[in-house]
Image (cartoon, helix red, strand yellow):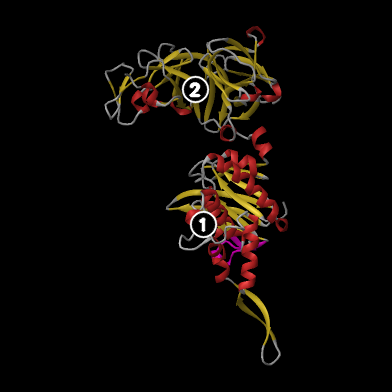
């Protein structure tokens, strides 16, 4: 977008608090009249970005432009923007009318006057009572509160108080309206109603809305474009349809809507393997490349077992009104499915996904992650079919094992947790795996299927007989098709439970 066509431009904006970078190299152009939403988890930097636009925080680096003018260090009261805060910040001692009119009574506008010598000049004057009344009436009409101007704000519902806060913000006719999670304090039904109302207000006003939320439904419902953030960095910018249907990475896919996300490996041209089966796909990646697989629940087809690409067993069922939601266990993997037809829990079903609905993304590989690992009766973590010793106390800070080799974890509160057969995600850094040609030295063994020189070391992929892959960084030279052992120290395996630990309390 050309700079002069954007009402707001953020260029290489960075914010550092006490040595910690909370917003990193933020670049965005916002069109006049656009409804744009910054979406992300708590602590991702979205509110800090909004506060920098408002002038409540100053950028450590970069520029913020409004209509091409640098406002990076302009004080808030000189910026033609208004903010609707999360907790409204209404004046409890004033009625609805006076809350909305408060800013107008303080405001001065330039007026051309003639002095005693007949010279014309500009003088700053307060608005007249008639002008204030007209502006307040229009703002209250837009938010459908025109018959409540005499009401005490403490007698209003949460939704009505929110509309008062919005009216107070728009009465000054800002070029940009900033909204910082304004619906978070409302109940679910009121929040959904206000989403529709906010979108209608946006159309009536025709000004730019800059909205911040962690709620994906709000973002998808109201936005023209969505900016997804993680750890202070923009992950993806696009329309709601683009963000949902074509997420750029596994984080975006997981954050926007429900998704099935798996580790995959490319096994041929437009062929990928995941959850123990080989699938056709439309994306082409290099042979043996590790990838992230995303499949939306609505794209999973449940068929007769013999017709499926893979087969699983239904482990749970929830009726959602217009459809059923099922979890199908395929080995140790869970597949979330939606179907309008009922199926019994325990039934065996086939799973089919059309190739167009298998989304494949580059994996930012810094760690080996095994999402179908579990704890066996000896207190070891099993990856594929191979058991590894692991420190189970990492699953609960301050805990200890009942005895060495036990699966009973005793928490700091004295509660006992039975980890036998508990499903976990296991992670192993690429630098923490040792390879050896002595097959007795490791917990697993496999064949080197790929070798790549990366600057100062090799990166290998070792594939076991049960088709688990270990990506390994090593300074030593091995050849493809060499058979090696895989050894990992106990302290180098990171674990996290796939279910809340409270579900594992032993009665």
**Residue 301: horizontal and vertical position, in percent?**
65, 18
Q: Position of residue 156 (x, y in %)?
A: 51, 53
Figure quadrant of residue 303:
top right
Task: Please rate how many residues cluster around mark 2, counting C-alpha atoms within 10 Å: few if below 14, some from 14 to 19, many from 20.
Answer: many
SS class, disc 2: strand
The reply to whether the magenta stretch includes residue 75 is yes
10 Å crowding of disc 1: few (<14), some (14-19), many (20+):
some
Identify the residue at image location x=51%, y=49%: 158
Q: Where 91 falls versus 424 (above or below)? A: below
- Say left or right for 412 vs 127: left
Residue 370 tag number: 2
Residue at (63%, 43%) from the top-left corner? 226
- Judging depth in this view, the residue of 32 and 104 nearest the camera is 104
* Numbered tag placed on residue 294 in the rendering: none
Residue 477 position, x and y percent, is: 51, 22
Q: Quadrant of the C terminus?
A: top left
Which label belongs to residue 60? 1
> Which segment is the magenta one?
68-81
Q: Looking at the picture, how far across and down is residue 338, in whole percent?
A: 61, 22
- Depth check: give the residue in front, 457 or 302: 302
Residue with the most extreme bottom position: 117
């Amino acid at each position: 977008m050309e700079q002069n066509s954007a009402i707001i431009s953020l260029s290489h904006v960075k914010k550092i608090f006490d040595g910690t970078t909370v917003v990193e190299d933020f670049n965005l152009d916002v069109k006049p009249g656009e409804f744009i939403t910054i979406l992300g988890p708590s602590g991702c930097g979205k509110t800090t970005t909004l506060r920098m636009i408002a002038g409540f925080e100053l950028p450590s680096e970069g520029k913020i432009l409004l209509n091409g003018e640098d406002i990076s260090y302009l004080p808030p009261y000189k910026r033609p923007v208004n903010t609707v805060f999360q907790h409204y910040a209404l004046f409890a001692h004033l009625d609805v009318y006076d809350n909305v009119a408060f800013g107008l009574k303080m405001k001065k506008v330039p007026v051309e006057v003639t002095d005693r010598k007949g010279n014309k000049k500009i003088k700053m004057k307060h608005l007249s009572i008639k002008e204030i009344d007209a502006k307040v009436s229009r703002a209250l009409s837009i938010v459908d509160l025109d018959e409540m101007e005499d009401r005490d704000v403490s007698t209003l519902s949460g939704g009505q108080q929110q509309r008062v806060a919005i009216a107070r913000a728009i009465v000054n006719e800002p070029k940009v309206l900033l909204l910082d999670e304004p619906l978070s304090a409302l109940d679910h039904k009121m929040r959904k109603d206000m989403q529709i109302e906010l979108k209608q207000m946006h159309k009536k006003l025709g000004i730019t809305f800059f909205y911040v939320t962690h709620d994906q439904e709000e973002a998808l419902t109201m936005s023209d474009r969505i900016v997804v953030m993680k750890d202070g960095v923009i992950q993806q910018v696009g329309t709601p349809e683009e963000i949902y249907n074509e997420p750029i990475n596994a984080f975006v896919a997981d954050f926007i809507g429900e998704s099935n996300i798996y580790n995959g490996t490319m096994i041929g041209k437009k062929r990928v393997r995941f959850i123990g089966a080989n699938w056709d796909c439309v994306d082409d990646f290099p042979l043996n490349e590790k990838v992230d697989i995303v499949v939306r629940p609505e794209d999973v087809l449940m068929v007769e077992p013999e017709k499926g690409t893979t087969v699983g067993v239904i482990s749970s069922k929830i009726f959602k009104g217009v459809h059923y939601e099922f979890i199908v266990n395929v080995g140790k993997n869970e597949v979330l499915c939606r179907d309008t037809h009922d199926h019994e829990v325990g039934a065996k079903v086939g799973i089919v996904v059309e190739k167009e609905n298998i989304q494949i993304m580059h994996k930012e590989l810094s760690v080996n992650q095994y999402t179908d690992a579990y704890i066996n009766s000896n207190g070891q973590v099993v990856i594929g079919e191979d058991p590894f010793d692991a420190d189970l106390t990492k699953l609960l800070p301050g805990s200890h094992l009942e005895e060495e080799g036990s699966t009973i974890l005793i928490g700091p509160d004295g509660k006992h947790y039975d980890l036998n057969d508990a499903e976990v995600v296991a992670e192993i850094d690429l630098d923490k795996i040792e390879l050896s040609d002595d097959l007795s030295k490791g917990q697993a063994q496999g064949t080197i299927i790929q070798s790549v020189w990366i600057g100062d070391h090799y990166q290998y992929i070792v594939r076991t007989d049960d088709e688990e892959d270990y990506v390994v960084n090593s300074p030593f030279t091995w050849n493809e098709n060499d058979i090696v052992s895989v050894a990992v120290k106990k302290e180098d395996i990171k674990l996290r439970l796939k279910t809340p630990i409270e579900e594992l309390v032993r009665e």
